Structure formats: C-alpha cells, structure tokens
Image: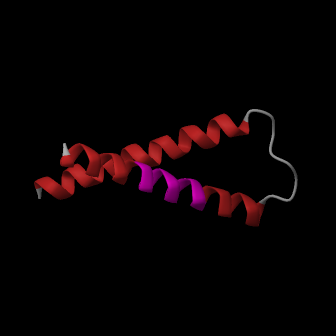
Amino acid sequence: MAALLKLTLIYVAAAQVGLLLLLAYLALSRRGPLPEGASVGLLLLASLFGLLGVVLALVWRWV
C-alpha cells in the first residue's frame, strides 16, 4: 500500500510541476487569451507529465 501511495504522490507532484511550467511559459510568451478548449489540453499535458513522473519513479526504483 505504501508503494502505491508513493507512486500516486509522485504522479501528482510531477503533474503539478509540468502544469506550473506550462502555465509559466504561457504567461511569459502569450499576451492574448487562450483559445477555446485550451483547458482540456492543459489537463492532458499535466496528466502526461504525471505519467512520465511515475515511469521515472519506477525506473529509479529498479536501478
């Protein structure tokens, strides 16, 4: 159970970091409003960053 909790926390933390980096990039580079439907893309990108974090955590554990 502790391993699952750890992986979940890594997933959430990686997703938050990825979303924070993306939002910082958008804040610094875009001056206009985001197009319609951009929130779905932002959430998808955050979930992909989270999955990447879990994969890295699993690789780290096996190495």
Q: Nearer the viewer, residue 27 or 12?
A: 12
Residue 29 lies in the magenta stretch: no
The residue sitting at the bottom extreme is: 28
Q: Residue at x 55, y 37 (%)?
A: 44
The residue sitting at the right extreme is: 32
- Quadrant the C terminus occupies: bottom left
- Quadrant the N terminus occupies: top left
On screen, residue 17 versus residue 3, left or right, reads right
Color theme of the render: secondary structure
The image shows residue 53 at horizontal and vertical percentages of 36, 52
Q: How many marks?
A: 0
Q: Quadrant of residue 34?
A: top right
Q: Residue at x 61, y 56 (%)?
A: 22
On screen, residue 51 versus residue 18, left or right, reads left
The residue sitting at the left extreme is: 63
Residue 20 lies in the magenta stretch: yes
The image shows residue 2 at horizontal and vertical percentages of 20, 48
The residue sitting at the front extreme is: 1
Q: Residue at x 20, y 52 (%)?
A: 59
The image shows residue 23 at horizontal and vertical percentages of 66, 57
The image shows residue 39 at horizontal and vertical percentages of 69, 39
Task: Tell me which segment is drawn in magenta.
Answer: 12-21
Please, what is the dominant secondary structure of the magenta stretch?
Answer: helix
Q: Residue at x 81, y 39 (%)?
A: 35
On screen, residue 50 versus residue 24, left or right, reads left
Q: Nearer the viewer, residue 12 or 40?
A: 12
